Image (spheres, coloured by chain):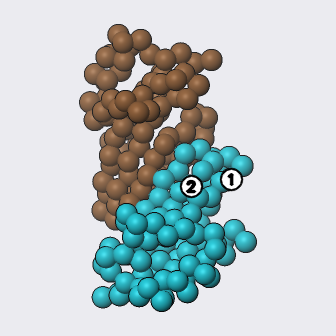
Chain colours: A cyan, B brown
């Protein structure tokens, strides 16, 4: 069972993820990504899907043409956990 | 410029797409797909992405683990058009 982050851990995580926003429902992290076109957006999604499957931790996400909105939350923890932070960092690393 | 379907065309299209639901905002067609797991869901999304790119007509869609929710609408037409009907039929054909 993975634990929800404490307030202190959450603040530290958000400080390390300046491009992500804390969201309340579900409790987690959110980021919007914008690309040149659908091809680029879906290519990014495919890379994230492979990361997510490897980590056995999956995003809640949506796509409209060149835009991808990702929310990371951990249902087993009832909110934000270290798994979300790790996946957010791995996603950021894809597009740095 | 692609035209929005007339009421008569819309009724005929919905009759041919019994697994899709008319939605109002945006005006279009919606269907939920459920798979065994994320791998199967994202595999389906990849097939849809290729169809969509080929048709130059893209879904508004979201995914949570094994579930994919698709909305088809045509921004250039201000609502439901023949392009949405064609893409819905092509998506249905993928999983028949």
Identify the chain of the residue marked 2, using the numbered disc in the image: A
Identify the chain of the residue marked 1, using the numbered disc in the image: A
Q: Position of residue B9 (x, y in %)?
A: 38, 13
Q: Is residue A31 above or below residue A2?
A: above
Q: Secondary structure at mark 1?
A: loop
Q: Position of residue B71 (x, y in %)?
A: 42, 39
Q: Is residue A72 above or below residue A82?
A: above
Residue underneath mark 2? A68
Q: Are marks 1 and 2 on the same chain?
A: yes
Residue located at (49% from left, 70% from top): A22
Q: Position of residue B81 (x, y in %)?
A: 48, 22
Residue located at (44% from left, 33% from top): B26
Point out the tag, 1 or 2, that comes first from the N-terminus: 1
Q: Is residue B29 above or below residue A18?
A: above
Residue underneath mark 1? A35
Looking at the image, do the residues carrying marks 1 and 2 touch, with CB atoms under 8 Å apart? yes
Decide if residue A87 is on the left or right side of residue A81: right
> How many C-alpha atoms fall within 10 Å of the one at disc 1: few (<14), some, or many (≥20)?
some
Number of callouts = 2
Residue located at (33% from left, 49% from top): B33
Decide if residue B19 is on the left or right side of residue A83: left
Place residue A90 in its image quadrant: bottom right
Closest to the observer: B51 or A38? A38
Q: Secondary structure at mark 2?
A: strand
Q: Is residue A15 above or below residue B22?
A: below
Q: Position of residue B92 (x, y in %)?
A: 37, 38
Q: Which quadrant of the rendered structure holds the C terminus of chain B?
A: top left
Decide if residue B59 is on the left or right side of residue A15: left
Q: Which quadrant of the rendered structure holds the N terminus of chain B?
A: top right
Residue located at (72% from left, 49% from top): A36
Closest to the observer: B45 or A25? A25
The dot on residue A59 is: none
């Amino acid at each position: 069972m993975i634990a929800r982050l404490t307030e202190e851990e959450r603040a530290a995580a958000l400080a390390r993820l300046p491009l992500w926003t804390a969201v309340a429902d579900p409790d987690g992290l959110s980021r919007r990504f914008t690309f040149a076109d659908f091809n680029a957006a879906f290519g990014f999604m495919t890379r994230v899907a492979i990361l997510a499957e490897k980590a056995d931790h999956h995003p809640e996400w949506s796509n409209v043409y060149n835009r991808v909105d990702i929310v990371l939350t951990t249902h087993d923890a009832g909110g934000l956990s270290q798994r979300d932070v790790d996946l957010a960092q791995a996603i950021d690393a894809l597009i740095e």
